[in-house]
Amino acid sequence: MLHWKKYRPIDWALVAIAVFMPFLPLVDHNGGHINVLVNAGIYMMLAIGLNIVVGFAGLLDLGYAAFFAIGSYTYAMVASPQFGLHFSFWPMVLISAFVAAIFGVILGAPTLRLRGDYLAIVTLGFGEIVPQTFLNLAKYTGGPNGISAIDQPKLFGYHFGLNPLPYYYLVLVLIAFSLIVANNLRTSRLGRAWMAIREDEIAAAHMGINTTTAKLAAFSLGASFSGLSGVVNASLLTLVSPDQFKFNVSITVLSMLVLGGMGSLPGVVVGSALLSILNFFILPQASNLAATVGLHIDFTSYRFMLYGIILVAVMLFKPEGLWGSEQRRAELKESDITKAENAEYEEMPRETV
Amino acid sequence: MELFIQQVINGLSLGGIYALIALGYTMVYGIIELINFAHGDVYTLGSFFSIAIIGLLDASGRLHGVPLLLVLAVALAGSMILCGIVGVLLERLAYRRLRNAPRLAPLITAIGASFILENIMQLWRGPSPIPFPSVVPNVTWHFGGVNLSSNEVLVVVMALFLMAVLQIFIYNTRLGKAMRATAQDRDAAQLMGININMTIALTFFIGSALAGVGGFVSGIYYGSTWFYNGFEAGLKAFTAAVLGGIGNVAGAMLGGFVIGMVESLTAGFISDQWATVAVFLLLVLVLIFRPSGLLGEVLPDKV
């Protein structure tokens, strides 16, 4: 049910932008812009997927790019001259998502009983192993050169080719689909189980939630979104190589979540849109602007400085993010009781050791 | 056999560097249960500071006048103090406010802090590798087909010496006792009159200063460094800390040497490309089968 009063003008602005997006190419005929938007869209899909793991279930996954790599390579291997296979794009979207999900289970099953911060490091290690393995298995993956001349999708006899426009609509449809799926998951029984685990895992287990199954579901569902984005990415670039899936991809997506608000779907959309605008428009423009006044600073090479500042500043001052949910805010801020206790301690007389 | 002994020697010196970094991870995790993600970058900063200090002394033409040992001592001490200060600042600015927040929050700020430090180093010295001034004469001894260099001996001796000092500090001084008490139960320690904030800051100072030593000796050992050096080294050192049993000083040392060995033996007998994969695979396996590490105690989850 819709509660009209709950919506702020800024919510309506977001809806208006979303409604306008399909008509944008009618106004903006610049292929470069459309191409940038497609890339931004792929990141948005990644962010929606990572949000299931980090935002809904509260599991910090620092190796998310690994599943992106697995999805990309799965499609690249069966739809390129590499092995002479040319499977169709559409079933491969589902199959690659499924393969990524299986790898999510393989990694998740043994590691999910670990405490949260250990999980972060294991996933980080996994994120390092996967691209390195693709690099080392040169016989199958083309090593550092990767796999090129990947097939592009065909729809009812229409070739996508190198024109970004069909990809634009494909990504829009996939984002809409992902948002609907993620929103349904959030309000489902499983989604509520995730929320309980996120808030207090021990209490959740005592309430009869099978925490391992629920966490595993989050992990593999998140991975499947990443695999799906990987297929789109591989066919768009017609090239995959190990250096596309480094740690910085995982961190970019995580920064998007943190900025917008972990666990909040509008937050994820806003966060990923803002960072993409920054990445693809503002930083290159700033470098150009600096060049015209004679300063040769490449601002784009310092984008990770900006991500670092975002991660620190948001966590310190607005942990629920720009568009976070009330609930997450309550969880992430220290409770008033703890605060009062601390204040009491601070006032106590003490001798130095 | 010769290859094996050679790789063991390489592994020990690699391991000495990992061990020095791992000590910082393990001390900080022991006291506030935070994976200080930026610690690897503090280690790189150690190399940067050492290079800067040696360069400064060299540029002013005093390097030829004063004994080499004095120059190195000043560089080492400077790097330790500066890294220690960076560590304390990190704790004060990025972590202290979040001490009572859910564990996800300080971990994310730690990742952010790591990226900020890396970029500061990139701004400072650019993105390419920076040579470490070759002021230390490197003597190599040959035993049959096995080579042993003085730098390798330096790394291992330095690591063992500092671990011994740290062990004595933690178990035989008042401040060490305060650190152990804070690690065990922060609230109770506070009630006993221990200044918690000071103790945690001290822990960060010592851990980061040790990373500074690591940066100094790794600079001498490898002969160069770059701003992104600390990411992988930090990850491997963290693996070492976990392998040894996080929170355990002797464990961090043992873990460091084991990781160094695994890396160099894989590189020697399988292939260079798989060395990193082997280390991370070991991390995953340890966390799955023995999350408390080799020397760590098994602790129940805190409710």
Image (spheres, coloured by chain):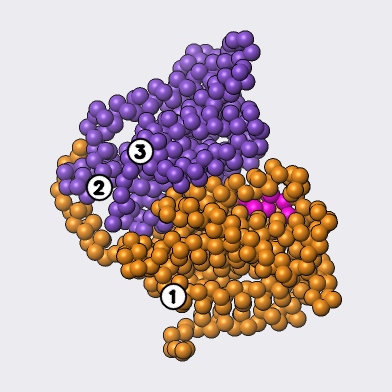
Chain colours: A orange, B purple
Report the disc number at residue A189.
1
B192 displayed left or right of A165: left
The residues colored magenta run A240-246
Q: Position of residue A277 (x, y in %)?
A: 63, 66
Query: Does the magenta run of residues contain A244?
Result: yes
Give the answer, above or below, for where A330 lies relative to A25: above
- Residue in the image at 47% along x and 84% along y: A7
The quadrant the C terminus of chain B occupies is: bottom left
* Residue A174, picture quadrant: bottom right
A340 displayed left or right of B299: left
The span from disc 2 to disc 3 (Cα, nearest Å) is 20 Å
- Which residue in the structure is indicated by mark 2? B186
* Residue A202, picture quadrant: bottom left
Q: Chain of mark 3?
A: B
Report the disc number at residue B296.
3
At mark 1, the secondary structure is helix
Q: Position of residue A63 (x, y in %)?
A: 56, 53
Query: Does residue A311 appear in the picture of this structure?
Result: yes
Instruction: Please identify, in this view, whether the residue under mark 2 or under mark 3 is nearer the observer.
Output: 3
Give amino acid for label 1. Answer: Arg
Query: Does the magenta run of residues contain A306?
Result: no
